[in-house]
Image (spheres, rainbow, N blue to C red):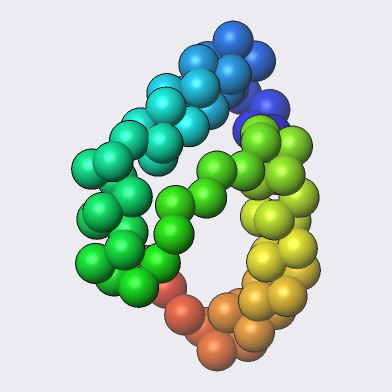
Amino acid sequence: MAAATPRPIVERLHAEIARIAATDEAREWFASLGAEPGVLTPVEMDELVKREHARFGQLIHDARIKID
């Protein structure tokens, strides 16, 4: 998890995102995109970000990709 984000804030955001993802409106919106809503725990999200960084970080660096 982001070191600078207080744990209660992370937990509150996770709870709100999970609540919204469980609504019919969210499920319908995701379905319109051919997807299903999924919610990761804060620990799972942290692990995903680390895996993706390890997977793509060097590629992005080598290709000199920048955010505008």
Query: Residue at the location (51% across, 22% down)?
Result: 15
Q: Residue furthest bottom?
A: 63
> How far across and down, in percent of the image, does residue 43 sit?
74, 37
Q: Residue at x 24, y 55 (%)?
A: 29
Quadrant where the N terminus is found in the figure: top right
Q: Is residue 2 left or right of residue 68?
A: right
Q: Please, which residue is most extreme toward the top here?
A: 8
Q: Is residue 68 visible?
A: no
Query: Would you place residue 24 above or below residue 31 in this image?
Result: above
Would you place residue 29 above or below residue 34 in this image? above
The reply, left or right, for residue 1 in relation to residue 39 is right
Q: Position of residue 41 (x, y in %)?
A: 66, 36
Residue 10 quadrant: top right
Is residue 44 among the parts visible in the rendering? yes
Measured as percent of width and height from the top left, residue 33 is found at 29, 70
> Residue 47 at x, y = what percent?
76, 50
Question: In this image, 56 relative to 23: left or right?
Answer: right
Q: Is residue 67 above or below residue 59?
A: above
Q: How many marks?
A: 0
Quarter of the figure that contains the C terminus: bottom left
Q: Nearer the viewer, residue 28 or 65?
A: 28
Q: Is residue 6 above or below residue 52?
A: above
